[in-house]
Image: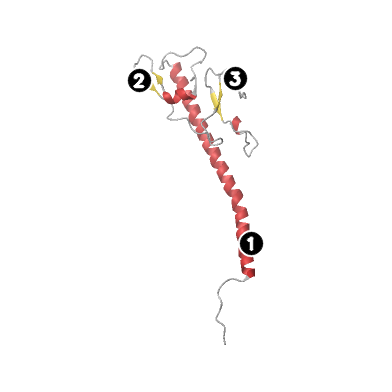
Amino acid sequence: MRRRRQRGLTLVELIVAFTIMLLLTTMAVPLARYKVRRDKERELRYALREIRTAIDKYKDAADMGLLGPQEIGTEGYPPTLEVLVEGVKAAGSVDKKYKFLRRIPVDPMTGTTDWGLRCVQDDPDSTAWCGRNVFDVYTKSTERAPDGTLYSEW
């Protein structure tokens, strides 16, 4: 009596298929991690540019006298990041406000809106904020970029 042709895989075929899948997976995982890191770096650059542009616009408006009276010691920079979102009353107007950001961007490296701040009076690499104005922002992440620089130095 003839046996019917059996369907299925032999043990050797299963081992070969499993090995191929294992090799493909081990190659794909580092690529996925690399892509995630690059996406976070791109988001960080965009968020820093957005905040720094808003700070510069605030400074320009303050220097042109478009904003209400400025506090002494701020040198025309915003006192906090929240001021850029809440808005500042226009000089000589009762109800007009200038807003420079819709929201404070999320730091993709830490997942929060808690950015490191620097004043005009602070050193360029300082991690302590003087509390008088916001001249620059940086991420509070302690991670390093692939080129070896700290993300907080960007």
Tell me which numbered mark, 1 or 2, is placed earlier along the sequence. Answer: 1
Q: Nearer the viewer, mark 1 or mark 2?
A: 1
In three-dimensional space, the C-alpha distance between marks 1 and 2, rounded to whole angstroms, equals 67 Å
Above or below: residue 34 compared with residue 70: below
Q: Which residue is mark 2?
A: 96
Q: Which residue is mark 3?
A: 122
Which residue occupies 56% across, 45% down?
A: 35
Q: Nearer the viewer, residue 119 or 60?
A: 119
Q: Which residue is mark 1?
A: 19
- For the C terminus, give its image quadrant: top right
- For the N terminus, give its image quadrant: bottom right
Q: Where residue 25 appears, x then y in whole percent? A: 60, 55
Q: Nearer the viewer, mark 1 or mark 3?
A: 1
In three-dimensional space, the C-alpha distance between marks 1 and 3, rounded to whole angstroms, equals 57 Å
Amino acid at pointer 3: Asp
Circle 2 packing at 10 Å, graded few (<14), some (14-19), many (20+), is few
Specify the quadrant of the image occupied by residue 57: top left
Q: Where residue 91 appears, x then y in whole percent? A: 38, 15
Number of numbered discs present? 3
Above or below: residue 53 compared with residue 143: above
In the structure shown, which secondary structural element does the residue marked by tag 2 occupy? loop
Q: Is 48 left, or right, of 86 in this rendering?
A: right
Circle 3 packing at 10 Å, graded few (<14), some (14-19), many (20+), is some
Which residue occupies 54% across, 39% down?
A: 40
Tell me which numbered mark, 1 or 3, is placed earlier along the sequence. Answer: 1
Q: Is 146 left, or right, of 136 in this rendering?
A: right
